[in-house]
Image (cartoon, rainbow, N blue to C red):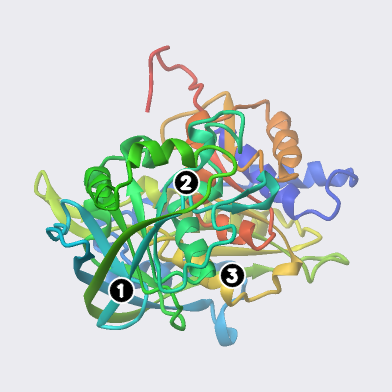
Amino acid sequence: MRNRLAWASILSLLASDAAAQRPSAAADAGRVARAVSQHAIRAHLEFLADDALEGRRPGTRGGELAAKYIAAQFERLGLEPAGDSGTYYHHVPIITLTPNPVVKITAPESDELSYRRDYVLWSMRNDSVTTARGDLVFVGYGIVAPEYHWDDYQGLDVKNKIVVALVNDPGLRDSTIFRGPILTYYGRWTYKIEEAQRQGAAGILLVHTPESATYPWTTVQSSWTGPQVRVEEPAKSLLVAGWLQRDAAAKLFALGRQDLTRLMDQAARPGFKAVPLGVGIEATVRSAISRSATSNVLGRLPGSGALAHDAVLIGGHYDHFGIGAPVAGDSIYNGAEDNASGTAAVLAAAEAFVRSGVRTGRSIIFIGFTAEESGLLGSQALVSRPVTPLSGIAAILNLDVMNLYGSTTDISAVGLDQSSLAGVFRRSAAAEGLAVTSNRDALLKGFFFRSDHFPFARAGVPGLSLESGLSFVGKPADYCL
């Protein structure tokens, strides 16, 4: 299992004190790697993915059992509790709102839009009824990016307005700007909502096209019409957010005597100026609300050097989708690959460090993240309320979907283009005789922004998320996952 050795080496080197300069670092990494037990990985994986854990959805019996199992393993290994109040648990308060929205066009007079067919909408507040009224303003891609000399909100006051924005970023249409077809965070729908909030808008509607979103409208319908789960935080000024199906957006633009296709073309060019659409809407969202709690699980292996007060985080999310619609009579979404495999790897890594006797210069905090599938909620909560100062976290290594398909001659990681950690990664892979490959699909689809390392990266902590290689040993040339 050469991949197993490689990631264990990477973990050890990241946590070492000045790993590149210390001759013993590579030897220590080898000791940790050899202490990884594939039998332990398999045992953890089989338990976490068993039907008894009912798919490990946060706030459920199965999710709680998974958290208790991880904490018990940390305690068995002698790791220090690194959660709240001397425990292994870091509390994450969850609010769930199931939306029932109505959107009316107030000016000019027109037929109402149809929920699910034309739009989806949810409340950004913690209230059972939220109403936003305002004129629509098309803000292009809704991006403020000084490093790319781009400001779609320049000179614009959107207070009491509802902005309409395109998803993805201008590089999708013009390869000479931003990062070309490689998605930046400015292209993510999460960024669009955050920027609308910063600009003081009352609401935001995102225009969906399969090309820009990289998924069909049916994905929008299934993802944003049921329960919407988030960390419960103080209310913000943004009232509502949602998606518009392209044809519905074109209808709204036409009501304001504007052409959506023409404005989309203009929005991809530098110097675009926002366009008021001359259309007013009233959006009311009635929400069924429930509250629950879940927990991240954290255990610390103290460092032994001058930087022992600093830390490296090694984590993976333990949650999955719970119980849902039956598939071939089976309603439990076991999540063996995503992400019982990563959780098993975190536990095996912790045991390997303990068994090897290696003590790195920095402390290592092993983490089972909760509620990743709900939108990185566990990692967001840990960044908002960290157990150790963010300034003292040297790096985070995220283990999300490990290789369950066989040995490879290569290995990859999401985020190699985002920080100086690429050098450590490449040295570790080379030490195990593995080539480092790049997953172009992950770059195009913005995978770097979609797992638990990312909230830390936004806060200035370098991060990588390990990926399986693709060159399998002993498999046919046309083998694919």
Looking at the rendered structure, the secondary structure element under dot 3 is helix
Label 3 sits on residue: 383
In this view, the residue in front, 68 or 370, is 370
Q: What whole-number distance in Å separates the C-alpha atoms at marks 2 and 3?
A: 33 Å
Circle 1 is placed at which residue position?
A: 133
The Cα atoms of the two marked residues, 1 and 3, are separated by 33 Å
Along the viewing direction, whichever of 96 and 331 lies nearer the viewer: 96
- Residue at figure coordinates x 50%, y 77% from the top left: 89
Above or below — where is 418 with respect to 379?
above
Tag 2: residue type?
His
Comparing labels 1 and 3, the label whose residue is closer to the camera: 1
* Left-right relation of 296 to 178: left
Q: Residue 361: horizontal and vertical position, in percent? A: 81, 60
How far from the left and from the top, in percent, is residue 112? 14, 61
Compare residues 371 and 217 and report the one nearer the observer: 217
| Residue type marked 3 | Val
Q: CA distance from mark 2 to mark 1?
A: 59 Å
Q: Residue furthest top?
A: 477
Please tell me how crowded label 2 is: few (under 14), some (14-19), or many (20+) other residues with Cα within 10 Å.
Answer: few
| Rendered location of residue 186, percent (x, y) | 54, 50
Residue 77, given in percent of the width and then of the height, sits at 58, 66
Depicted 442 relative to depicted 280: above or below: above
